[in-house]
Image (cartoon, rainbow, N blue to C red):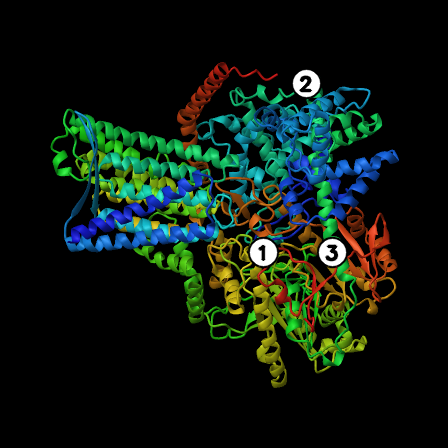
Amino acid sequence: MSENLLSISMVVGLTIPFVGTVLLGIVLFFGKKPGEKMIGPLFQWLTFIDLFSFLLASFFFVLLNASMFRLDFGRWFELSYTSFDLVLIVDELSLIFAILTMTIGWVVSAFAHRYLHLEEGYLRFFLLFGFFVSAMLVVEFAGSIEILFVGWEFLGLSSALLVAFFYERRQPVDNAIVVFSVYRISDAALISVVILYHHAFLPHHPPPLFSSMEEILPILSTWQVRGLAFLIILSALGKCAQLPFTFWLPRAMEGPTPSSAVFYGALSVHAGAFLLLRSYPIIEQVPAARVVLGLFGFLSACYATSVGRVQADIKSSLAYASATQIGIILVEIAAGFFWLPVVHMIGHALLRLLQFLRTPSLLHDLHHLQNNIGGHVPKTGEHYERMLPATIQNKLYRLALEQGGLEALHHRYLLDPVQRWILKLDRCERYLCRLFSAEKKPK
Amino acid sequence: MRSEKREIDPISRMVEHAAGYLPSQGPIGIFIHHNPLHHLEHLPFEEAVEKAAKLYNREPYLSEKQLERALRRGRIGHDQLRETIAKEVANLGKINQNNVEIVHCVFSALLLHRIPPGQGSEFTWLLEETEVLRTLRADIEQQQLEHLLTRARTRYGTDISRETIAGFICKELWQVCQGLVEQDNLYSPTFTKEKCLPIDPLRKRYGDLLDQIVSPLMIRLAAVYLDQGIAYWPMPDRDKGFYRCFVDLYRSRLQNFLDPRLASLPDLLDEESKSRYSSEASIVNSFKRLGIVPNEYENAILAALLTLPGWAGMFHQVELRPDRVPVHAVPARLVDFLAVRLLIDRAAIEKPGNFSTDLKGSSSTEGSDQVNRTEQRKNLAWKLFNVAQLLGWDGFYLKNLPFETIAVVLSILDRFSSVQRRRMLHLALEKRYRSNVLDALCSPLRKAEPIDRIKFQMIFCLDEREESIRRHVEECAAQCETFGTAGFFGIAIYYQGISDAHPHPLCPIAIKPLHEIREFDLASSSEDKNGRTDPKRFLGQAINLLSIGSKTFFRGSIISAGLGFLTLFPLISRVLFPRFAALIKIQGRKLIDRPRPGKLKIDSDESIAPIIAERYGFSKMEMAGIVERLLTDTGIVSHLSPTVLLVGHGSTSLNNPHESAHDCGACGGGRGGPNARAFALMANDRIVREILHSKGLEIPDSTHFIGAEHDTCADTMVYYGIEALSPEQSASFTEIKRVVDLALKLNAKERCRRFFGDGKSINLIKAERHAWVRSEDLAQPRPEYGHATNAFCVIGRRIRTKQLFCDRRAFLVSYDPETDDEQGTILAGIITAVIPVVLGINLEYYFGFVDPSGYGCGTKLPHNITSLLGVMDGYQSDLRTGLPWQMVEIHEPVRLLVVIETKPEILDHVLNHNEHFRRLIVNRWAFLATLDPTGSGIHLFKNENFVEYHSGDNVLCSVRRSGDWFEARSEHLPFARTGDTEG
């Protein structure tokens, strides 16, 4: 009984945002523009119903008293040597994060409805936001690495497109490319996981990764497990804006405030930590991977907190604060905790969301604070001046101000060569186009 | 040494000169409305905007699209178009009388219909992919169309289908047009190469690439240097000045690792540091190294500053007015900024490889003159082709026109540009609104209320947002009289309230206050020295610690893991139930912070040391002077009623970096409440009244002044000093408060009509609530519309504007011409005080609307508060000054029309003694008219003279109350008479 009810509420919860978004996409594709009065409240209701159905699902899940529940949608396709199963898993982790996602989705769609009122990109925002929420759900409930990858890709795409929301200016587009390039590294790592995993099982059909750890771990060789673990960590580091990729996070603050809030304060930036929690049984097998993860988390947190302290704009300052906390969350995961990072992530996501949404209030809040304190807000950072000799102080300050030069590295070794290649390809294409379309040469 | 000095001195002069081109907006916490083109005020308006358009790459007038919408909506009248055309034709010079008619028709066709540009890729596309050369335009008027078709049918036969015949017409016409423009003896196009403004040598050589390398670093440095407290760790040694600070910080050998594109920076800076340059000397040195010759300096400086005008402007503002900086006045200097910029430019240029790829692309636009000439002829043919269709001319007709006519038409078409079209349409739009205003003002006078029946008087700020509430108060209580004056009530002060951390200026930007006034806590004895109750202070510190802590490492993890989930409650309540959340907040605040009576101390006091100003408080003589000035200026002095309310105003909103742009303009972006309160204290003072009595100015003993502050966003009113009223005064105050409360609701309702674009009707209670919730809503980017729609200013008695529905578009200044002398002394004083403020507001909105992302700061949505001084777009950009789109979107950009109730001779006299004002009027930055104090005659100032205005045929509608007029309408409303008892 509760099993059926759980399945029903899960299916409802999963389909609603997806169907809503796709419908909006179709309508937009055919050039119709539904009114704001319809779309805003519609999304608010969709997310609310969704939230409700996930709450119901958790209720039934508790009744069921199982540690994990599998939702099987059969096999997508099958070849002689491999197959792809459509499997979702419902457990504490996925339900908690689904509820968090939908709560935030609910609040933010109400916020955005008013905040983006009369904005040209209003519908585009909701379309991308809908895709993002659906992708987030796919990531959270994915039972196999292939399904997770689909959600992962959509997450990155919707995120990059929202960074480039104001595409009429150059900067948002440039920064969206930076963000996207890091996401591609992360995606590449994840798809390598898929390939590695399928290879490991040749010539047999691999079982869905996340739902059957007990089945798979004995079959894989140590090297394969190591490979999987490190690739997953790499993928998570990119998505979580940890070292050496931290520089993309403040650059992502180009979109409207609610999208910055939900992506880089609350949800998207935690997706990597979620992936680590989900695949923890694999990482657990490799002590070296845990050490590396913990080390990167710790270094990232130190790095981000130092860089964040010199930022003079509120959104960058919050972005680095987020990266700091996520670094600590990764350390917690590496240390083998489960509930601590979960609670930390939820608390952090909600806190940052509110802080980001309130960024435009900074001056107003400062005035209130001065009123309460009864004078100027106490100065900060004086201990740096006291404790450090001037030369070291200057060097440290510069390193922090220029974000440790990570960006220059990324540009020099990755982004610029790739962009040059793409420009070459573009020139090639133009040439071919001219050749075949017999276009007259412009005078 | 000597020669060096000769080179350095002009540098600071040139920088100072270039600074004029930078936005002069200071820190965003005190927003000042000003004319963004203040440095071009010596030019006629049209010339100035078009020059600025080229210089800054901005829009001069409304866009073609907006103007077309205005045409469709009837905001541009045909009469005015005809007048504008007539004026333009007159400017053309001698035209044969036979051709005048045709020229008029040509202009009218050009203005009423848009012709796509005849060059560029859109044109290529039109010719290749559409049927423009084979079908007639769709917007040809019926008569002309019939004419074309019938004539064609007589030539080609009657049985041909309409499409085919249209094809014939077009083909022939296009051929004829092309033929005509080729005939050099007919008209040879004036071949003018687009005159570019001089660009600087650097950017000519290196293009935008240089800025792409240098600007991000420059932005980062400027932000941390000016930072007022966002960064936890402030930049070290800021007191040394920006240039020194930069040189010391960037000498360390980290550069190659941090940004290899600027690898030579440390070497450069070593040299700088060794030679101990001043910033000016460093600039000269940089110019020499960059190969810029002295006569290029001026351009080079301007261009270097205009790459980041917002930041450069902020450096200049902090340098000029350190008293307006919110927390920490750093020693910023614009020359430092320039010197640093040039150093980084040099480093970028010296590094080989930075400019290897894109260098050659920049200067390839030369093209041969021959190509340009043919293009231009084609463009001309295209214009002729379109105009001919619109006028109903076919090829045959065109060919047979007299040569002279064709030559005239071609010369008009050749010179006609999009900017000219926009200018003419814009002028017609303004003209129409002007004639509406003047017609409304010259309608017959109302009868004045008998003086003895007036129970109370209210003096408001002249702000156009207070127009509506004045109207509503008067509609609610006939025995009330209202006045308007600059909302600082003549009191220029630095003010520190109980709730302020430090004093801030409350007066127009042009004045630097001499006096300081503070509010003291009455109940301070039992509490700490600042008079703050402990729980409040504790809460403040706790919040501060939490918000700083949440961004740090250890504290952050404890806060986010331990307390983070608690933010769910404010999140849901604030966003989803803003009204509920605001109510809780107010209740909560009451718990920890009981409202305490603060006491304003306005008397001068040697024992109190002023923080910023020279002196604390005012002497009694000064007070008497202030009171006298205001009472005589407004003309209230002859008939003071028992209660006089002085209403300053301010605005509260959440999540709005531009909150202060909604505050009082006359208080220099502050709130006028303290000024109103101080004024009431002064006017109630016994000694002040005695001094006034000795000067012959009588204030009856029965008259009592009360200060108040109107929150224009939440539509609420706070009164000061109520507890000190006598029982009698208290009773009449209760009555007044009842009237004002009703008026506030009506005012909220009138504002709501703009918020709902769809003309939804809303009842009073809902309206009141809606306006209030807007001020408390985190997700609301438009808490109020501010000064949007402001359009004209009336200086005169209220009776001239009473019961006139001005749609919150009029600045109303009280002035009684009868009390003034023949030289207009009082008037001259009012003009000096009021016009700069009002004009600043008007032009800030004009430019904010015509180019929202250029002169304004674009949409609010991605704004990122930086250094507590301004906003950037997203991650990093120039500091965005000006108004956000959300504040101006309902505006109609028309230049200010100032109507003064006086005689032309008097005003002429005043004009001649106020050079600045005169220059503004002569250069048409605003329009000026007089309204005859005894009758309804109007004289407009035109070409240095006052010309009588003949009223048009606009008839005013009459309604009973203004509520009947705006009910369920959201667009700009025409004038109307209210208080119609029959209707």
Q: CA distance from mark 1 to mark 3?
A: 23 Å
Disc 1 residue crowd, few under 14, some 14–19, many 20+, Cα 10 Å: many
Locate residue A203, reporting x and y percent: 15, 24
The chain ID associated with circle 3 is B
Q: Is tag 2's residue or tag 1's residue first in the polypeptide sequence?
A: 2
Question: Is disc 3 surrounded by few (<14), some (14 to 19) or many (20+) residues within 10 Å?
Answer: some
Task: Report which residue position mark 3 lands on.
Answer: B436
B358 shown above or below A18: above
Residue A225: x %, y % from top left: 18, 31
Report helix, strand or loop for mark 3: helix
Q: Quadrant of the C terminus of chain B?
A: bottom right
Visible in this render: residue A206? yes
Left or right, B599 with respect to B393, comes to left
Asked if badges 3 and 2 are on one and the same chain, I answer yes
Q: Residue at x 24, y 30 (%)?
A: A194
Residue linked to disc 1: B785
Q: Residue at x 83, y 27 (%)?
A: B402
Q: Chain of mark 1?
A: B
According to the image, label 2 marks what residue? B371
Which label's residue is closer to the chain start, 1 or 3? Answer: 3
Tell whether label 1 touches label 2 (CB within 8 Å).
no
Left or right of residue B423, residue B696 in this image: right
